[in-house]
Image (spheres, rainbow, N blue to C red):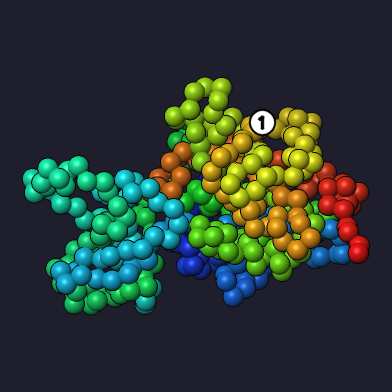
């Protein structure tokens, strides 16, 4: 785990639709040439394409955030969500509002002190619509003077850190900035390597609002296979031992199913076989909810066998999450081993060409 790389990419501001700063960090770190499309997706072939089967390596750059909807007369900021937040994770935190001119305004989630709460208010369920931001102003005019206006993106304030004693990293947007950093390291490791496939990294946008960027990258690249590197929700904090499938320190997660995709059994078996052969720690997951870019990529024209490799993240979609460096390293190792093991014959077996 390249800690400096992870710090730079995870600290970057980039809610869905506003991933430009993340894209710049990714492109600056890549060892190979890259291009950006109109949606800010970044494409980076590991080597010049040579007519071999294309394997898409996906990681999404966006993080859950908000957008300014309106400003009240006393200067409080109303929000709409960009991605899936749980209401009770939002209050009592600091956020960054990115203004039209590129400056950042710090704001805190506003709340009524308990001294003023009625009995009914204490019992009322929290809703995202009721959560406002206070940027330290007292009027709409003052907020506007700071550059805050409808359409401004909002993201959590957080800073990356690493505990050498535990091997755990702490920071924001590990879903999926750790996947992005891992994909950059994979490009570095395999840059110029002689592979039997054409490996193309695609750092995608707007995953948190509907897997949108990956729909474009899959259409553009027309891959035969795809591997998604993802920061996946850990469940080891609330699931009994032996039942948890996202355990920090247990290795890279190979996902069989979620609400967006049933993984290709042959590709899953291939990944498990390679992991066992290489001695790479891994864990299996069958999820009843959630989804990844695999949900859109595997439905690209002709169908694309897609594998999701997860780096478990505790407290995903909040200000801060924990991940284990060992799981990150296992994801990097397995992705690299898979690319080295893939041959045109294996690709044809997993994704036969249908000629009608």
Seen at 71% across and 40% down, the residue is 334
Image quarter in which the C terminus is found: bottom right
Image quarter in which the N terminus is found: top right
**Residue 304 in the image, given as x and y percentages of width and height:** 75, 55
**Residue 277 in the image, given as x and y percentages of width and height:** 79, 31
Q: Quadrant of residue 24?
A: bottom right
Mark 1 lies on residue: 281
**Residue 90 in the image, given as x and y percentages of width and height:** 32, 50
Work out whether residue 180 or residue 303 is closer to the camera in this orientation and state it: 303
- Could you classify mark 1 by the number of other residues whose Cα lies within 10 Å: few (under 14), some (14-19), or many (20 or more)? some
Tell me if residue 25 can be seen: no
Rendered position, 198 above or below 253: below
| Lateral position of residue 142 relative to residue 94, left or right | left
Q: Residue furthest top?
A: 241
Seen at 24% across and 76% down, the residue is 144
Work out whether residue 353 or residue 251 is closer to the camera in this orientation and state it: 353
Seen at 64% across and 32% down, the residue is 283
Q: Secondary structure at mark 1?
A: loop
**Residue 10 in the image, given as x and y percentages of width and height:** 48, 53
| Lateral position of residue 292 relative to residue 111, left or right | right
């Amino acid at each position: 785990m390249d800690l400096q790389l992870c710090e730079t990419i995870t600290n970057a501001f980039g809610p869905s639709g506003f991933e430009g700063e993340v894209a710049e960090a990714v492109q600056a770190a890549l060892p190979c040439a890259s291009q950006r499309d109109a949606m800010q997706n970044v494409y980076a072939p590991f080597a010049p394409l040579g007519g071999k089967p294309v394997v898409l390596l996906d990681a999404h750059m966006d993080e859950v955030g908000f957008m300014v909807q309106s400003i009240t007369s006393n200067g409080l900021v109303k929000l709409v969500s960009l991605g899936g937040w749980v209401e009770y994770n939002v209050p009592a935190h600091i956020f960054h509002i990115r203004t039209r001119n590129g400056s950042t305004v710090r704001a805190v989630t506003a709340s009524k002190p308990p001294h003023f709460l009625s009995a009914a208010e204490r019992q009322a369920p929290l809703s995202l619509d009721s959560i406002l931001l206070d940027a330290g102003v007292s009027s709409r005019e003052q907020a506007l003077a700071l550059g805050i206006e409808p359409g401004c993106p909002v993201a959590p304030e957080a800073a990356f850190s690493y505990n050498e004693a535990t091997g755990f990293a702490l920071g924001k947007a590990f879903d999926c900035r750790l996947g992005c950093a891992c994909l950059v390291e994979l490009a570095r490791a395999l840059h110029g390597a002689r592979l039997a496939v054409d490996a193309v990294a695609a750092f995608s946008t707007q995953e948190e609002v509907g897997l949108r960027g990956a729909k474009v990258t899959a259409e553009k690249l027309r891959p035969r296979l795809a591997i998604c590197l993802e920061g996946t929700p850990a469940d080891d904090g609330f699931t009994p031992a032996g039942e948890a499938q996202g355990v920090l320190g247990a290795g890279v997660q190979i996902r069989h199913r979620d609400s967006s995709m049933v993984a290709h059994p042959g590709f899953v078996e291939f990944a498990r076989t390679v992991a066992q052969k290489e001695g790479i720690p891994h864990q299996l997951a069958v999820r009843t909810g959630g989804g990844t870019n695999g949900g859109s990529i595997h439905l690209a024209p002709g169908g694309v066998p897609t594998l999701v490799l997860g780096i478990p993240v505790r407290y995903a979609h909040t200000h801060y999450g924990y991940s284990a460096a060992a799981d990150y390293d296992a994801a990097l190792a397995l992705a690299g081993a898979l690319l080295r093991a893939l041959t045109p014959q294996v690709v044809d077996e997993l994704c036969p060409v249908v000629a009608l």
